[in-house]
Amino acid sequence: HGAAAGASRGNSKLAAMAASAPAAPPEEQQKNIDEAEAKEKRLKEIKEKLSKRKRILENLDRAEDLTCKLLQVAHATTRALENLSCAPNISELSRTYRETLRELHPLLSTDTEDLIQPYQNHSTETRQSMYAARVEMRLAKERTQVLKVITELEKKQRKEENRDIPGDSKKRLRE
């Protein structure tokens, strides 16, 4: 009702503006009407966006409450496992935990794509970055091994060159 009433008020405002405005050229009148309609359209978009954000914030508040409930269940589970005499209690806690997760997931997955990244995406990114890090580390190790081999070859080559040169020229090479 509120949106329809707002739209009818907007149309009546346009009509009142058109009736009260002095006779202007038709192009200017059309321009004014187009500007007013554009403003109304923009206001409607803003109201829809605000309504969506309000729903998201309400869902996030509910998700926060459910997360606190999960922490309480985890605490109670820890206590039950300490005593080990509360086996029926543990099965009840397990059921509560699963139900809470089932309720929590839709709250965080609907209408929140822009605000919250699902955990699955992070694990994919992590796997990709971990793979890249492993490849980089392997390449660094291979680079180190190649440099060691090159260094050893250069040392052997220098030793061989020093053996082939007569005694006088060794002194000149060192200088």
Image (cartoon, grey):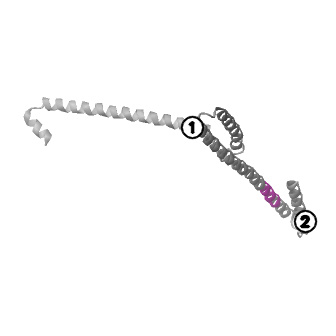
CA separation in Å, label 1 and label 2: 75 Å
Instruction: Name which residue lies at 72% across and 42% down.
Output: 110
> Residue at label 2?
16
Give the magenta part as a residue range: 35-44
51 with respect to 132 (left or right): right
Name the residue nearer the viewer: 174 or 112.
Answer: 112
Tell me where residue 153 sits by quadrant: top left
Labelled disc at residue 82 = 1
Q: The residue tagged with tag 2: helix, strand or loop?
A: helix
- Which amino acid does the dot numbered 1 rest on? Glu
Tell me where residue 18 sits by quadrant: bottom right
Labelled disc at residue 14 = none
Q: Indicate the quadrant containing the C terminus: top left, top right, bottom left or bottom right.
A: top left
Vertical side of 50 occupied by 18: above or below: below
Instruction: Name which residue lies at 37% across and 33% down.
Output: 141
Vertical side of 134 occupied by 5: above or below: below
